[in-house]
Amino acid sequence: MKKKLIALSLCGILLMTTACGSAKLKNGEEVVASVKGYEVSADELYKELKGSYGYEALMNKINAYIANKEVKTTKEIEDYANQIVEYYKQYATQYGVDFEQFMTNYVGLNGVTTEDQLFDYAVNDRKIAIAAAKQIGTKYTDKEIEDYYNDNYSEKLTVKHILIEFDEDQEDDTDEAYDTATDLIDQLKDIKDNDKLNEKFDELALNYSADSSYENGGLIENFMKGDVVEEFWDASAKLKNGQVVSEPVKTEYGYHVILKVSSADKDSLKDATDDIRIKMAEQEMSSDTLLQSTALHELREKYKFTINDSNLKQKYKDFINSLNSDDTTTDDEEE
């Protein structure tokens, strides 16, 4: 149940060349702004924006279109996006600024100023990553798929948890976190009614948990052994449904209070194959910064991607050349 710091980036520039009821120059071009003695045309503004942001905006739109063709929006993706929103909401609160100011000044997402906009961006971002992973995953052999399945697939568990963070460099902080987690367990251990237990757990998660799942009672659904750290899995697997751990579970992230909700049978290899290809590819992408960009290039080729503008075309050509060189850094790396 690793918390992932997700680095997000977005060129939120809208390149607009027409508008209703706007002023016109003598040559028919739209005037988007003016001061005494000077008028800025839509064409002039477009050329300026194209030079500064046009390439990134173009690639974002193309990648998003392809990803939406390749990947359906699932509940898992929506849950991921909601976690991103909650994650940044927490940090905005921590920094004492409103959400729009935090996104603009601290995260740097131009054009993403509301929770709905961040949700939509996160959905697209995740679908682009999955589309790239699916493309990469086509290269794995049946033997590699089966080996991964045997090593990582297990029954699927659903639990609720409360994370109490600590600083391992400060012994008193660790002791305080342990004491807090122990106190929460004490508040739960004598509740026999399942509905009341879940209600109390949700209340404590909302008030104490440092994990992004706190608003949903700390719910983590359908995870397998390979999806979480070993200590968390071992503690969860030993519990009976409706049972709370008897003592805090320590992981690298802090102390966890865990309530087991349910378990489900292990998926068959046949049913798991597509998911395994994606997971294997995502592991590769985490250690190869250009692998996703290469996969997205292959997908654009599949969709017959062409650029008519000469300047943007040259920039894309330079980027593709960089993928084929030994240089692993480029200003135009895609998200």
Image (cartoon, helix red, strand yellow):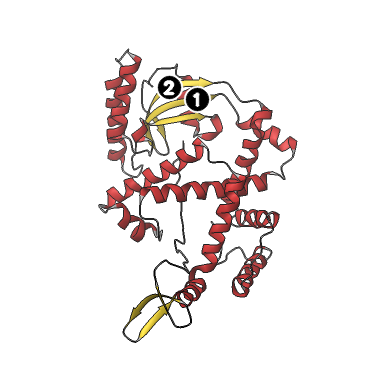
Number of marks in the image? 2
Residues at marks 2 and 1 touching, judged by CB atoms closer than 8 Å: yes
Q: Amino acid at mark 2?
A: Lys
* Image height of 309 relative to 102, above or below: below
Which residue position is annotated with label 2? Answer: 260
**SS at badge 2:** strand
Tell me which residue sits at (30%, 20%) in the image: 188
Q: Amino acid at mark 1?
A: Leu
Which residue position is annotated with label 1? Answer: 157
Looking at this rendering, what residue extends furthest in the left direction? 96
| Residue 129 place in picture, x, y as percent | 56, 48
Quadrant of the rendered image containing residue 294 = bottom right
| Residue 146 place in picture, x, y as percent | 70, 32
Front residue (pair 133, 153): 133
Number of residues whose C-alpha sits closer than 10 Å to that of mark 1, classed few (under 14), some (14–19) or many (20 or more): many
Looking at this rendering, what residue extends furthest in the bottom direction? 37
Front residue (pair 42, 25): 25
Tell me which residue sits at (53%, 41%) in the image: 73
**SS at badge 1:** strand
Report the side of 236 relative to 283 (left or right): left
